[in-house]
Image (spheres, rainbow, N blue to C red):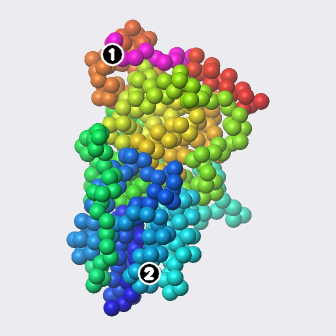
Amino acid sequence: MNAPVILWFRRDLRLADQPALAAAAAVVSGAPVIPIYILDDDTPKHRKMGAASRWWLHHSLAALDADLQALGSRLILRAGKSDEVLCSLAAETGASAIHCTRHYEPWWRNAEKAVANGLDEGCAFICHDGNYLLPAGSVTTGSGGQYKIYTPFMRALWQHMPPPAPLALPTHIAVPENWPASENIGEWNLLPTTPDWSGGMINMWTPGEAGAKKRLENFVDKAGLYDEKRNLPSVEGSSFLSAHLHFGEISPAACWHATMHAGGSVDVFLKELVWRDYAQNVIVQMPEYGAKNARDAFDKLPWRDVSDPAVNADFVAWTKGRTGYPIVDAGMRQLWATGWMHNRVRMIAASFLTKHLLIDWREGEKWFWDTLVDADYGSNSVNWQWTAGTGVDSNMFVRIMAPLSQSEKFDAARYIREWVPELADLQAPYIHDPDEYGARPKSYPRKIIGHKAARERALKAHEVVKG
C-alpha cells in the first residue's frame, strides 16, 4: 500500500470546499488519508480556547468524525504540542506528507514552522489556503505594500471577487489498513459540568458542517435585506454564521457564492466576509494586536485599574449584565447564555466598557475570548481596538456611543424584554432608560454611572493621549 498522508485539522472542520483534504486524497492514487485533530493548549499558551469555544469544539469534532465515518474514514484525536504530535505520528505511520489549511494566528504560524522543521526527510509539509477569501498578504498596494486601512483593502480585494467556486464534498477517502491510536473526546473534558451552563447554547446552536449549511440556507433569503435588519437586535437579521466560519465548518467562498445574487443590500453582508480577511491581514502585520495598542499614544491613557475593588466591581457588573443600562445588560446576558451577542450590541457593550467605565479594552477582549463561541483572535482584536479608538484603523476615542439613545434608535425593546426579564413589563420609551422615567423596578440596578459624567471622565482621560 502507498505511504499514508496525514490531514491536520484545526479551524477547518469541514469536508466540503476543503483544499487540504482534496490535496491529501489526490497526492497518490489510493494513498490512505489519516485525519487528525490535536487538542493543543501548549502552543497558544494564554491564547488557548476559552470555555465557550471548547464547548463548540466538542460538538464540532463529534460531527466531523461522524461525517468522516459516513465516508468510511474516521478522525484521530490526540492531545499535546502540535509539532511534537505530528512529527511523532508521521514517523509512526511512515507518512509521506502532512496537509493542512494555513492559519494566521501568530502561534499557529509558529507551529507550522516547527512542524516543517521537525519532520524527518521524506515527509513533506504542505499548507493550503481556504479559510479566507484570499490568502493574507496577497492583496497589496500599487507599490507592493500591505494595507492597514480597511476601505482601500476592501476595494482592492473586491477586484478579485467572486472567489473560486467551492470544491465539492468528496465521495471517497482511502483509509489505512491499521489506524493509529486515538484518544477519547470525552476524556478531554471540553464540556462544562459543575455547573453545566451550556443549556442556552445547546438550544441555539448546532455545531458542525451540517449545522453550518443549514444556517446558510436559512440566511440566503434574508441576505438581500441585511443592511436594513442587521442593526436591529429585536429582529433576526444576522446570518448567525460567525462561529461556523471561525471553526471552518463552512468556507467564506461557499457563503459568498450562496448569497452573491440575493440583490438588495447583500453587498453589506459580503463586506463582512471581507472584514474577516482584513482582520487576518492586520494580525499578520502586527501579531501582538490582541495585546498591544496599535496607536502608541494610547499607552498613556489612564485606564481605571481593575485590581482596584471599586473598579473591579464595575467590571463584574458589566460581565453580569448589571450596569443599569438595559441594552448593555441585555447584550451581556445574551452572551453568557448563548455564547453570542448581536453585533450592534457588541459595539455598544464594548464602547460602554472602554468609554463609560474607562476600563482597558484588553479586559473586555479577554472576557469575550472566554465567552464567545465565535472568539477569533483577528476579529476580536480588530473589533475591540476599532471600538476603543486604539486601532490602526478605528473609531475615534472621543466618539462615545450613547447606549440609551442607541437602544431607542435601533428599537431594542423586545430584545431587552427577552434578556432582562426584570424590565419585561415596561413599554417604550421607559424600557430604554427606566431610571430617567422613574420606572425602574427594585430588582433592576441603578446606572453605575450617568452618561454625562462618564463622557466627561472619558474625554478628560483622553486629554493625556492628546498631550
What amino acid is at disc 1?
Answer: Ser
Q: Residue at x 74, y 31 (%)?
A: 466
Highlighted range, magenta? 441-452
Three-letter amino acid code of the residue under disc 2: Ala
The residue lying at 29 percent from left, 29 percent from top is: 418
Classify 206 as above or below 458.
below
Does residue 15 appear in the picture of this structure?
no
Q: Which mark is residue 50?
A: none
Q: Nearer the viewer, residue 383 or 45?
A: 45
Q: Nearer the viewer, residue 385 or 75?
A: 75
Q: Which mark is residue 443?
A: 1
Q: Is residue 305 magenta?
A: no
Q: Quadrant of residue 334?
A: top left
Indicate the position of residue 230 as horizontal and vertical percent values. Answer: 40, 40
Which type of secondary structure does the marked residue at label 1 adopt? loop
Residue 451 counted in the magenta span: yes
| Quadrant including the N terminus | bottom left
Q: Position of residue 108 (x, y in %)?
A: 52, 62
Residue corresponding to mark 2: 91
Note whether residue 320 is visible. Answer: yes
Q: Tell me what residue is drawn at x 64 percent, y 62 percent.
A: 140
Residue 259: image x %, image y %? 37, 56
**SS assignment for the magenta stretch, majority:** loop
Query: Residue 77 vs residue 85: left or right?
Result: left
User: Would residue 151 appear left or right of 180 to someone viewing this image?
Assistant: right
Residue at the far top in the pictured view:
438
Q: Determine crowd level at label 2: few under 14, some 14-19, many 20+ residues with C-alpha closer than 10 A.
A: few
Circle 1 Cα neighbour tier, 10 Å, few/some/many (<14 / 14–19 / ≥20): few
Q: Residue 345: image x %, image y %?
A: 43, 34
Mark 1 or mark 2: which comes first in sequence? 2
